[in-house]
Amino acid sequence: MTIKEHFRKNIVLALPVIIGQLGHIMVSVADTMMVGRIGVIPLAGATFAGTFFHVFMLFGIGVSYAITPLVAADPSNRSKLLVYLQNGFLLNGVLAILMCFSVLILAPFLHLFGQEPEVAIAAKPYLVIISFSLLPMMIFQAFRQFSEGQSNTFSPMIVSIVANMINIGLNYLFIYGKFGFPVMGLNGAGYATLISRFIMVLLMMFLIRDLWKGFKWKFDVGVVRKLLHIGIPSGLQYVFEIGAFSMAAIMVGWISAEALAAHQIALNMVAVTYMAASGLGAAAAIRIGNQMGKKDLSNLKRAGVSSFVLVVIFMALAAMLIVLFRSFLVDLYIDEIAVKEIALGLLIIAAGFQISDGLQAVGLGVLRGLMDVKVPTLVTFFVYWICAIPGSYLLAFTFEMGVSGVWYALSAALSLAALLHIIRFIYLTRRLQF
């Protein structure tokens, strides 16, 4: 297979995955845009609640990713595939319940994190509401990863599009109190997210009903252990990265509510491009998993290299669009001048680290396809928690660079992560023998 054919196959496979990945983050984008219209405090409250919720959500998503490479490596063995789905379903369900309880335990203590009192008060009920959406989201992930492992990326894409349209419609009804509904503000956004995610899992199960025909409640300790072996490190990779961004948001909240709102706006836009790159990474994991199953080292290398090249092109275009349209994009969120000025400055920094962010996201996907998860997890912990968090505090407060200092530190960490993941891919593929 030529490099050109790999590009084509990557794009065909990745495009629906990207749209599906964007489904998760677009819920947050819609909430942020629509909540921003009712004031700085609700927007800052959504940001503060999201710093905790997204750590749990992305940990769960990371764990669920274990299903895909296992299914992709042997897509023709139906009985084995159903065992992966059955145990992935059970694992995701149990994990969702544990994560939901963890968020509920955390919610009463939000006032201890040094935010403005009004922000903590706004964040608490919203966090409680969206915590219950973890259960339908994780069940959806089990069926989605099972589907994508069999190269059916179209169905999850359709579900994500429909669910986001429903979420936006419900936001309009609940946040602003339209068509007889009470005005619920930020909490309305939470209820919209919860309802749309229940609809999402039901729709996904319906669309791929032929793929999971014969589903049984069959617990297999060996399969669960295999899922955890891949899934826990993958989940921790997200925790270390998103946790670092969440810690950064808490530090930004020490500066002011306006800084925190601006941080959320800029982070919202960066999250969109990141989830797109993560979609390329998920597609890369499928491609690499397929070549591992075929024991085709030459095409495995080409699949990985073409994925890296694709994400560089995509993220370079994203950086250009961020710079060119940053004023227009910020205007979509809020009218507060002070918040706008901070957000515009942060988007320039964000444009500068787009390629690094894309490379590290695809790097994790490629390495996951190679079943290499432990070393990337250690790399992620090192670059974000040993380098980025202390660096953020140092630049923001010691050198008095404020919120910009936080973003410069995060930018450096993303670049280091990208470099180390690429080096790891080259090292493993040189040693790999079939």
Image (cartoon, rainbow, N blue to C red):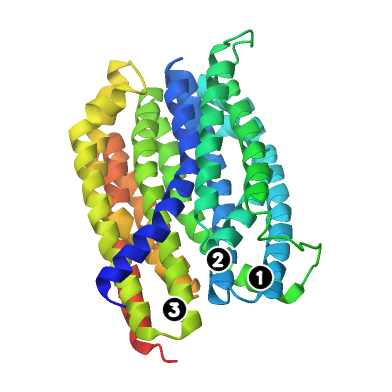
The crowding category of the residue bearing disc 2, from other C-alpha atoms within 10 Å (few below 14, some 14 to 19, many at least 20), is: many
**Circle 3 sits on which residue?**
291
Report the Cα–Cα distance between label 2 and label 3. 14 Å
Instruction: Name the residue type under label 3.
Output: Gln
Report the Cα–Cα distance between label 2 and label 1. 9 Å
- Percent x, y of residue 37: 42, 16
Residue 319 shows in this picture: yes
**38 in relation to 329, above or below:** above
**147 in relation to 34, above or below:** below
| Left or right: 172, with 342 as reference point | right
Residue 398 shows in this picture: no
Disc 2 vs disc 1: Cβ atoms closer than 8 Å?
yes
**Circle 2 sits on which residue?**
150
Instruction: Name the residue type under label 1.
Output: Leu
**Circle 1 sits on which residue?**
81
**296 in relation to 420, above or below:** below
